[in-house]
Structure formats: C-alpha cells, structure tokens
Image (cartoon, grey):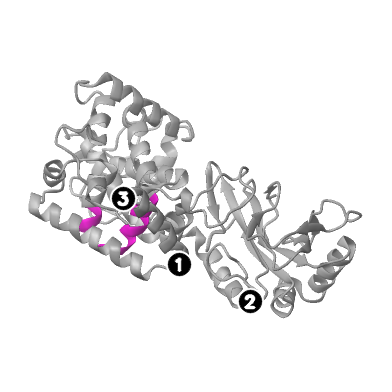
Amino acid sequence: MNEKDLLHDDDHLDLITLGEMLTGERPVSDPEALAAYRAEVEAVWKAQPAFDFEVLRAASHRVEDTPAAAPGRTRRPWWRWAWLPALALAAVLVVVAPPPGPSIRTKDVSAELSYFLKRGDTVMPAPDNVALRAGDRIQFTYRAARNDTLVLVGVDGAGTVSLYYPSRETEPPIAVEPTGSSVLDGALELDATPGTETFVAVFGARSTAAAQRRVRKAYEEGGHAALAALAADDPSVAIVAVRKR
Amino acid sequence: MHHAPETGPTEAEVRALYDRYGPVLLHRCHRILGSEELAQDALQETFARVIRHWDSFRGESAPLTWMYRISTNQCLNMLRSDKTYAGKLDVYESDFAGSERVEGGSEAWDKRRVVRRLLDDVDDETRRVVVALFFDELSLRQASAREGLSVPTVRKRMAFFLKRARRVLETAPAPVTAAILFFLHLSGLS
C-alpha cells in the first residue's frame, strides 16, 4: 500500500463523476470511459433483486431518525443481527471443534480438513460465525500428514449419515499425499436440512465402509459432540462443523 | 400502486429513483464492500432512508450526491460491524472449481481487499478519506471538497492510513502478513 494507490490528479476521471454522467446529472465528457464504466455497473446490477416497494417501505420504518442531509452513523438493519444465534453456536463449537480461519483443525501430525464456501459469485474460506444455507456450495480442502487414505463422511442436522468421498461404500478410500493443502474434486451443494452438519475426514482408513461405520457409531453414541470428541482424541480424524439455517 | 404514509413518496417516485440511481449506487457499494449480498443490503438501506427522509430529500438538487453519502455511511458501518463477514471472509478468493491446490492463495489478494481489511483499523474520518481517494478515485482536492476537510487534513489522514497499514503488517497473523507482503511486492513497495 503506498501513496500512488491513493493519489489521483484533478483531471483523473473519478467514479463519482462517472456516476453523475451515467445518471444524467452531468454531461458526458469521455464516452469511452463511460462505456467501460457502464459495462461494470450493468454487470453488478444483473444480480440485483427486482424492485419491491413494500420491502423498501418496510425497511424505511426501521431506519433511525437521523437528519437526511447529514446522515450520521446508521444503526445496523435488524436483519443483520440474524447471525447472532449462529455466533452463539459457533462459540460453543469453538470449544470442541474448529478454531477460526480456514484451517479448521490442526493435528499434531498436521492432518487438516477445511473448506471453501461458494455463495453466489463469491468464494470464501471457511467462514466464522456465518450460517450456511441451502444452495451454498462447499469444496473441501485437506492436508495429509503422509501418504495416506481419506474417507469423508457427513452427518447432517437430522442425523443422516452421508458418504461423500469416495462416492460409494464399496470403493476404496481415496489416496492422498502430504503435498500441502489440497482440494478434493467437486463441490457439495447444501440441502435445506437445518442444524449442525459435521463433516468428518478419517485418514488412514483401510476400508470405506469401516470408516463410515465408525463415524455413524460415534454419532449414535453422542451426536455431533461425539464427532468433535472423536477428532479431538484421534489425530487421524479431522472435522468441520457447519451450521445451516 | 402503493403509497407511503403521510408525506412519503409514491411507488412510482421511488421506482424512478431506483431505476436511475440504483445501478450506480450498487456498483459503488459492491466496490467498497466486495460482497454482492452486502452491497444489496446497503442499497436497500439507502433507499429506505430516501423514503424515510423524503421531505428533505425531494428538495435536493443533486440526489446522487445525497445518496452517495447515505450509502457511504452504510458501507462503512457494514465494514466495521461485519468485520468477519465483509472484511475477513471476502478477502480471500480463489477459483473455486479451478485450482487443485490452495497453498497460501496470496495471489488472490488484491488492493481492494487489503484496503477493506485495513479500514477496520482506522477512525471514521480516515475511512471516509480512504473511500474517497481509493474507491472513488478522487484527487486530494476533490476529496477535500466532498468531505468538508482541508487538503492538508486529507493528506494527513492518508498518511495515517498508510502508517497504520505498515503497522498492521508487523502484527498481522502469518497468512495475512504473507498476503499483504505479496500485495506490497506487487506495488513495488517492498
């Protein structure tokens, strides 16, 4: 970061001026620059939900009564606090499961499981304090400690146990190498089942079916907390727990 | 056709403003926040305030200037309040389906993300100056006029921001440091 990123000449065509040109508040002085700007604006606008007067009017009732001409700090809209329950849950999960940041669980032997979230056009590393939702897509990353095998099993909020990697119980565990953080092929699209979903990576399993049974047994004995305990006790197991709303 | 209570605008009046100014405002919010979802929230909040303050707004000779100010407030509030969401989560993008490895990912950092992250660490006046200089690409003089600050003050705020950025580099966690150092390398500073 240096001055050249912040300093512009007075004759530089700034974004405010371009906006005024595009909205007709100012005569167009540079059609070429305006065309490029228009393309950018239209690309962003494509994803905007349709105009809904009732939604805007309802939101206006929640706006604090600050002077319009000199707006002060605004209160956060009420819906922005919707993540608070997820935060509370995350605070609990942190005790037994993932520390903040993209590396969800670090073992003594460096076995890790994490993920990237894709929501709309945005891709982000495993988010803290954000509830996931139906339609979100996640792609797992792992870090193996050695040449090993991996089986990835998920248990959703309804207790349904699903095998993700490999795709069939009859297939052998997938082979992994200690080559740093790597991405598992493909992405999962989350369904609408609410609650906590725990993804369990079992490294070193000789049998996919055995690994899946182990996860199922742990869950049946103690729910998601037992899966977290499993990961805490066994360095060959890593978990990611997400909250779906 | 809906009509807002009391002296509020009609649906047609709001729709006309929305169609004319909404795209430009959304683009700017998206530029500042780096998140489509947050930008949409900021735009909604901006128009909610237009409706709320309709009586004073309708007398504005430059509606866009007024709405820029409203949306700037909203964006800065979101950056400050949603540090984890807008600042932390959106600073690190990668090609989701593309690369087979996600080692470090520092190449995914760009200037906007670095600035967005650093905005968490400075005062409100500095934030406004940085938004004007960096996101809106105004000159010192233009930023001075828009923010009602002297040019020396704008320059001072800018210098403070750069100094703060360097301090963050010294205290940031390793991955963050690596990413910002990568950015500085690209900027020719390191």
Find disc 1 in the rendering and name its residue.
Answer: B174
The amino acid at mark 2 is Val
Secondary structure, mark 2, is: helix
> In the image, which disc is placed on residue A96?
2
Whole-angstrom CA distance, mark 2 to mark 1, is: 24 Å
Residue at left offset 16%, top offset 34%: B59
Task: Categorize mark 2 by other alpha carbons within 10 Å: few (<14), some (14-19), many (20+).
Answer: some
Chain letter of disc 3?
B
Magenta residues, as a range?
A: B113-128
Quote the CA–CA distance across marks 3 and 1: 20 Å
Is B124 contained in the magenta span? Answer: yes
B39 vs B5, nearest the viewer: B39
Circle 1 — which element? helix
Residue B180: percent from the left, percent from the top?
39, 57
- Badge 2 vs badge 3, beta-carbon distance below 8 Å: no
Q: Residue at (71%, 78%) from the top-left corner?
A: A229
Indicate the amino acid at tag 3: Gly
In the picture, measured across the screen, residue B67 lies left or right of residue B23, that is left
